[in-house]
Image: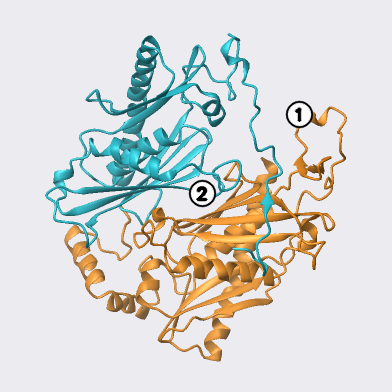
Amino acid sequence: MAAKAGAAPATYSPSPTTYKKNRPPIFTDVDWVRPDGRDFHQCRPAFLRTGAVNAASGSAYAEFGNTKVIVSIFGPRESKKAMLYSDTGRLNCNVTYTTFATPVRGQASDNKEISSQLHKSLEGAIMLDTFPKTTVDVFALVLESGGCDLPVVISCASLALADAGIMMYDLVAAVSVSCLGKNLVIDPVSEEENYQDGSLMITCLPSRNEVTQLTITGEWSSPKIHEAMELCLDACSKLGKIMRSCLKESASTSQG
Amino acid sequence: MGGSANGATDLSSEMEVDAFRRLFPLRFHERHLLESVRPDARSLGKARETSLALGAVASADGSALAKIGCTTMLAAIKMEVMTPAKETPDEGCVAIDFHMPPICSPIVRPGRPAEAAPVVSKQLSDTIISSGMIDLKELSLVSGKAAWMAYLDIYCLDADGSLFDAALLAAAAAFSHLQIPVVSLNDDGRIVVVSKEKEGEKPKNKPVNEEKRKLKLRSIPFALTCILHKNYILADPTAEEESIMETLITIVLDSSCQLVSLYKPGGPALAYESVVQDCIALSRQRVKELQKILNEAILDMEVD
């Protein structure tokens, strides 16, 4: 909404909008350093907190480097009137981006796609038959997009579901790996995602060792896929532990 | 979680209080008002605890996170370049938008935006523009050719009443934090950011705004919303109080306590002159508190 009367004039961002066309020397250079100085197989430090939004039944905030996400859970509550009777509960997922999430204002990617992927990765972990006829709403807001948005949203959402007391078989941890030439980099930042040849994302239930979703895009060879999956599963189990300790912490503080 | 402040000690009486609160919300609140106290243990004229953090969003040019009680607002400013209008070649522009994403409240659902959002949005841009906080001339870059368009987006992350007050505080704080990027005019007539790495090299084009990195904010507006119910005035209501007692009055004063705006959108209780005077007196106190909180937040940022 323009504050001044009249048609809003067309504006542009003064920062260089297009990424450098030439790729970084990551393909040949062994000593290549990642933009944030991490090792290829090192994840960003994860910061997780439950109870971020008081108005919701459960919520969580996740910060992985510059990727910042809030997820709120509402319900179980009455399904939409138009919905048919259902023995099992329904899950309704929605992901939105803030206008300032991306370097250039209002250039967030398609959130319908992300919403449906969030739904698919969570539904296998939730005991839907514990809330028949009703709907649980999972709403996510990406405050800042710094790469790996979807995995962070998924992990954060499962933490929020636990905070809301929704019955689950296990927490859902998600990690992605980018393939850049010969190298595999885990938990890529946006810049790396822009250069990647392929990406692989696993969402799994770490204690049960079950995978709810596996997405592979781009160019991969089978040994690379194996290596990437091992990397992801290992990272997922570590992330699962962090999520678990976050829940324990919030449970002990609320009791005390 | 969310301890009740009713002095109920054992679980059974707490359950009863909770049931009473849900079944007879108005009587529950009126019973408290008789004792000059509110369910969250505040006195009637007292606002909730307020905090501010500047620079919460790294990808924005200016940002702030404001919390009043549980109500949380995240404001961020992104600067873009526009061609100024013919009538005002030396002025930039400020575009203000207020969002209530589905995460903030159970009443907002995707595709069905909250009714309050466009109302607060309009109120915010009216207040910020008319308060004269920002001199639009300061946003000019090259007269008649280029000027800044400041996109201010405010997101409500948690809605628990007094949304406008928190949003205005976040907006004012984001403008205080705003750091305008150094730009120059390139050969194609476009404005581009002077990148830090190239500072060592001889700059090809002279920066056009080296001295104008910060906006001079004059008379920052601060708001206080009150509920009028019978002969009570409740400052800074929660969402629950707003839903039960419907008459709201919002007063905006600037730093020198000049009245900027007064907004009373209907409601069953009528505002007599003495009531309005009382509300303004409450707002005066609140402006001092908020000014102090803002100053401290700015100092904290400068220390870091």
Identify the residue at image location x=22%, y=57%. Answer: A79
Report the chain shown in orange.
B
Report the chain shown in cyan.
A
Identify the residue at image location x=62%, y=71%. Answer: B126
The kind of secondary structure element at disc 1 is helix
What is the quadrant of residue A123 in the picture?
A: top left
Residue at label 1?
B197
- Mark 1: which amino acid? Glu
The chain to which mark 2 is attached is A
Total numbered circles: 2
Could you say where residue B240 lies in the image, as x and y percent from the top left? 36, 68
What is the quadrant of residue B134 in the picture?
A: bottom right
On screen, residue B163 above or below A241: below
Identify the residue at image location x=41%, y=16%. Answer: A220
Q: Which mark is residue A98?
A: 2
- Mark 2: which amino acid? Thr
What is the quadrant of residue B122 in the picture?
A: bottom right
